[in-house]
Image (cartoon, rainbow, N blue to C red):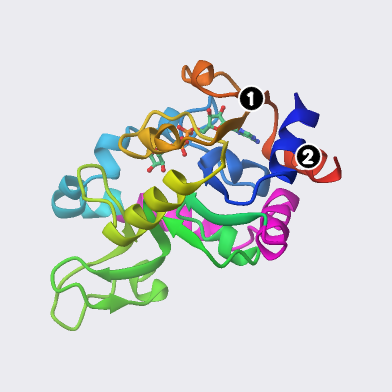
Amino acid sequence: MLKQAADVLKNASRAVVMTGAGCSVEAGIPDFRSPSGWWRQIDPRTVATTEALEHRYELFHAFYAARIEQLREVRPHNGHSILSKWEHQGRLQLIATQNVDGLHQAAGNRNVQELHGSIRHFRCASCGRPGAEQAFLDRAPCTCGGRLRPDVVLFGEQLPEEAWHASLAAIRAADVVLVIGTSLQVYPVNQLPFLTDGTLILLNAEETGEDHRFDLVLHGRAAQLLQAMDEQ
Ligand code: APR
């Protein structure tokens, strides 16, 4: 199966990658729905929502501040570096990611579409003016008096139009879509891979419930599988 996946990628001319939290786990960032994931400790509906932002700012702030602090010593892993190499070799057109950690860009990928936004950037929840990370961590108000928030897409919010359309166009035109480290449980990103006529490959640590819709499925850890594919 791994050799088949490597061969499919080698012969691809318009490959697209879609990643989820499982692609960052080996860099030290917990995912959401695994036994050790974030949503095992805290209910997303209580923190990752505009309701929490507006009515429970302390809890909202504590949750995102913890994730920002955690990112300080986090670096891309070897799998991220391989995805960057593949882009520079012209094998990979675009990464559509659900991750907000910025690790694909840190590894050197240039065409990264952040479908759930980014925790690396901040804005005022009232006037939309950009804010600095330290100002968010210090709970410093915006000059308009509003409170700062990370540029992540909260549950119930619209996805960034440009990222969505760029990802959709690339996936429609792709001859291979490689999906890495996602449970495929969150709409509408979980629909994206199936909008391609290309070959569908899934790299994931466990069953997703959608495995049967993929042409090739490799169960394992993202960094290790990417390294093995790259070596093939
Ligand atoms: N290698 C490969 N897959 C892994 C690894 C790993 N090292 N570790 C975990 N996984 C798999 C898990 O088995 C799981 O199927 O990655 C998947 C991660 O799924 P989720 O935790 O649901 O993360 P994700 O699919 O990205 O969640 C989507 O939900 O909470 C929202 O906005 C948040 O973007 C997130 C969205």
Q: Which amino acid does label 2 sit on?
A: Met
* Residue 95 in the figure: left or right of residue 190: right
Q: Name the residue at 50% across, 60% down.
A: 112
Which residue does the numbered mark 2 point to in the structure image? Answer: 229
Q: Quadrant of residue 107?
A: bottom right
* Residue 170 in the figure: left or right of residue 150: right
Magenta residues, start to end: 61-90
Give the spatial CA distance, label 1 vs label 2.
13 Å
Where's the C terminus, which quadrant?
Answer: top right
* 191 within the magenta span: no
Which residue does the numbered mark 1 point to in the structure image? Answer: 216
Q: Name the residue at 19% across, 65% down.
A: 125
* Residue 106 in the figure: left or right of residue 208: right
Mark 1 or 2, nearer chain start: 1
Where's the N terminus, which quadrant?
Answer: top right
Q: Is residue 211 above or below residue 69?
A: above
Q: Is residue 154 above or below residue 4?
A: below
Residue 230 on image: x %, y %: 80, 45
Q: How crowded is mark 1: few (under 14 residues within 10 Å), some or many (20 or more)?
A: some
Residue 124 on image: x %, y %: 22, 71
Q: What element carries label 1?
A: strand
User: Does any portion of residue 187 appear in the rendered image?
Assistant: yes
Q: Name the residue at 42% across, 44% down.
A: 172
Residue 75 on image: x %, y %: 66, 59
**Nearest the eye: 114 or 70:** 114
Q: Main secondary structure of the magenta part?
A: helix
Q: What element carries label 2?
A: helix
Q: Name the residue at 64% across, 61% down.
A: 73
